[in-house]
């Protein structure tokens, strides 16, 4: 058994499908089946059972997988320590990123990181902030880029961006009262919904009779651009919007702002590949104190 066999078996466990596993390891289905039979003969046990629902590992197969995962961890640790000794940054970077930041800020940063550290395996998950935060807390990633305050996180954080939340309309509707227009409503987290609800009450903005419910910010912006109504959108998304943009203010004069943070732990920041990514993001950004 070699590292290719380890990769094959772990891919089989993840996909539960010989065809998909064969595609991922760039071989044929028949070659995968043949190699499984060879491994079963070498080990003297049945590793997998086949059915219409896919494949399932036997108890003996689960034992083999458990040891292969331990071997993989040890090999990764050894390679990382050897690279560290030579001043080479390698290893794995797992980062979760909120949808808006991933769309409007992340691509050039991630490209720069990959160009500088080609030996690092990057795993980037793009999701809504609350889901990213939950996965981060569960230890499924070392770094989390989230939108919102997340005051229950008492670990280190870096403020990456802070921008106003704005009312947007097309130029043709610039002078029209918002109450006379349909509202294009985009899905937002509870914090944003709470803030915008307060703003509406304070500014006596009635609920529009005609509403468009958009499943993402880009759709909301395009609907407004076409003159179909007004919307509430953070400034991070408006670099290419050519309509009317007005920052939102509460009754006491405070602007409605949206923050983006990088969350991490001191333990993960000790890893060279993680520290390198943090450094890339924090250049010119304030490091906030933490408890």
Image (spheres, grey):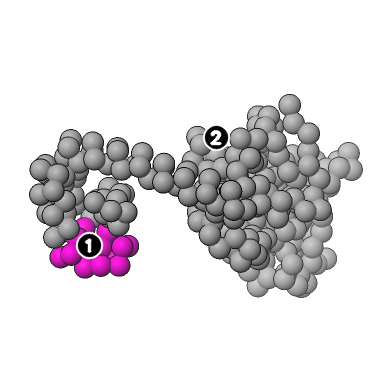
CA–CA distance in space, label 2 to label 1: 34 Å
Would residue 25 be visible to someone looking at this image? yes
Label 2 element class: helix
Residue at horizontal 71%, vertical 39%? Answer: 157
- Residue 161 in picture, x, y percent from top left: 75, 51
Indicate which disc residue 19 carries: 1
The quarter of the image holding the C terminus is: top right
Is residue 151 left or right of 67 when viewed as pictured?
A: right
Earlier-in-chain disc, 2 versus 1: 1
Q: Depth check: 84 or 48 in front? A: 84
Q: In which image quadrant can residue 152 be found?
A: top right
Q: Residues within 10 Å of mark 1 (few under 14, many from 20)?
A: some
Indicate which disc residue 137 carries: 2
Q: In which image quadrant can residue 44 be found?
A: top left
Q: In which image quadrant can residue 219 be found?
A: bottom right
Residue at horizontal 75%, vertical 58%? Answer: 235
Identify the magenta region.
18-32
Q: Depth check: 224 or 233 in front? A: 233
């Amino acid at each position: 058994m070699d590292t290719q066999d380890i990769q094959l078996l772990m891919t089989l466990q993840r996909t539960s499908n010989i065809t998909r596993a064969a595609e991922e390891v760039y071989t044929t289905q028949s070659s995968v089946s043949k190699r499984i039979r060879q491994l079963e003969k070498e080990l003297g046990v049945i590793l997998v059972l086949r059915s219409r629902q896919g494949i399932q590992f036997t108890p003996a197969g689960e034992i083999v997988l458990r040891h292969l995962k331990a071997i993989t961890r040890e090999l990764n640790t050894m390679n990382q320590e050897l690279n560290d000794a030579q001043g080479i940054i390698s290893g794995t970077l797992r980062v979760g990123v909120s949808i808006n930041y991933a769309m409007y800020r992340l691509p050039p940063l991630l490209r720069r990181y990959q160009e500088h550290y080609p030996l690092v395996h990057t795993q980037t998950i793009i999701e809504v902030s609350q889901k990213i935060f939950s996965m981060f807390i569960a230890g499924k990633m070392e770094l989390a880029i989230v939108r919102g305050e997340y005051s229950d996180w008492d670990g280190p954080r870096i403020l990456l961006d802070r921008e106003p939340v704005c009312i947007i309309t097309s130029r043709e509707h610039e002078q029209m009262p918002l109450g006379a227009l349909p509202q294009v409503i985009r899905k937002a987290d509870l914090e944003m919904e709470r803030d915008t609800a307060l703003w509406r009450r304070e500014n006596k903005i009635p609920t529009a009779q005609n509403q468009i419910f958009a499943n993402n910010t880009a759709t909301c912006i395009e609907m407004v651009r076409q003159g179909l109504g007004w919307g509430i959108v953070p400034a991070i998304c408006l670099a290419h919007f050519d309509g009317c943009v007005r920052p939102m203010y509460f009754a006491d004069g405070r602007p409605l702002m949206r923050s983006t943070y990088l969350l991490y732990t001191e333990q993960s920041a000790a890893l060279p590949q993680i520290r390198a990514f943090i450094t890339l993001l924090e250049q010119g950004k304030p490091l906030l104190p933490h408890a």
